[in-house]
Image (cartoon, rainbow, N blue to C red):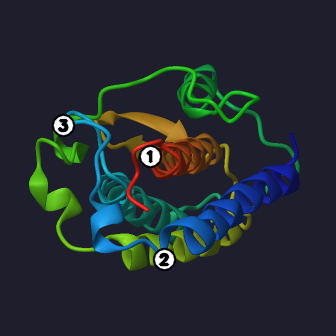
């Protein structure tokens, strides 16, 4: 795909996440925000806290690498690496907006294990992080998204191309916003 197509795809998904936040999540009561389908499930606030924890890591990594790269010439085409494609495809929703594969969140990103992840109301922080992500997507279009490498959150030794890392984060956000919408649409969700 071209770099422009990649930027457009990332922007569309992130704007859709913001729209879902505005329309379905911002108006929830505290009870609704913290309601769980069962004791092992995440509530909407847990989901947003999880996403905010990832944003804390990845947004700082994106900014640092974009600002310090010597690869300041954007390339016409972006080509995913096999590892990068595997990473973001694993996060991507199915055609019916269904979650195809479930993953266990690492301990440092799991709100059922680390209660501080979802402490307080996470909605405004998530909104701010999505606006920040839109700015980072725009800024990333000015560098070579194939040559700039981002260390992943669970191992600094493994690095993804900037374009692949942006796809991973964006699809990860979309996946969990769908998870939040599934909680909201649950039959027993408080009205």
> What's the distance in space between the residues labelled 3 and 2, CA to CA?
24 Å
> What's the distance in space between the residues labelled 3 and 1, CA to CA?
13 Å
* Classed neighbour count for the residue bearing mark 1: other residues with Cα under 10 Å, few (<14), some (14–19), many (≥20): many
Which disc is residue 23 wearing?
A: none
Give the mark, 2 or 1, whose residue is nearer the N terminus. 2
Q: Secondary structure at mark 3?
A: loop
Which disc is residue 27 wearing?
A: 2
* Classed neighbour count for the residue bearing mark 2: other residues with Cα under 10 Å, few (<14), some (14–19), many (≥20): few
- Would you name the residue on which mark 3 appears? 39
Q: Position of residue 142 (x, y in %)?
A: 72, 67
State the quadrant of the N terminus: top right
Give the mark, 3 or 1, whose residue is nearer the N terminus. 3
Front in this rendered view, residue 161 or 25: 25
Q: Position of residue 52 (x, y in %)?
A: 35, 62
Residue at 44% across, 37% down: 159
- Would you name the residue on which mark 1 appears? 183
Residue at 27% across, 59% down: 34
């Amino acid at each position: 795909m071209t770099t422009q197509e990649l930027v457009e795809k990332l922007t569309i998904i992130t704007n859709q996440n913001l729209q879902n936040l505005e329309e379905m999540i911002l108006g929830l009561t505290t009870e609704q925000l913290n309601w769980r389908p069962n004791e092992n499930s995440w509530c909407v606030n847990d989901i947003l806290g999880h996403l905010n924890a990832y944003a804390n890591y990845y947004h700082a990594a994106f900014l640092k690498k974009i600002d310090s790269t010597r690869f300041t010439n954007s390339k016409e085409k972006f080509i995913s690496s096999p590892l990068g494609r595997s990473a973001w495809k694993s996060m991507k929703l199915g055609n019916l907006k269904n979650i195809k594969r479930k993953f266990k969140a690492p301990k440092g990103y799991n709100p059922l294990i680390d209660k501080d992840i979802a402490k307080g109301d996470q909605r405004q922080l998530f909104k701010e992080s999505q606006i920040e992500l839109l700015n980072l997507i725009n800024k990333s279009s000015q560098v070579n998204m194939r040559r700039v490498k981002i260390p992943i959150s669970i191992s600094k030794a493994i690095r993804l191309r900037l374009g692949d890392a942006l796809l991973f984060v964006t699809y990860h956000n979309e996946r969990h916003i769908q998870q939040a919408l599934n909680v909201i649409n649950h039959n027993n969700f408080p009205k």
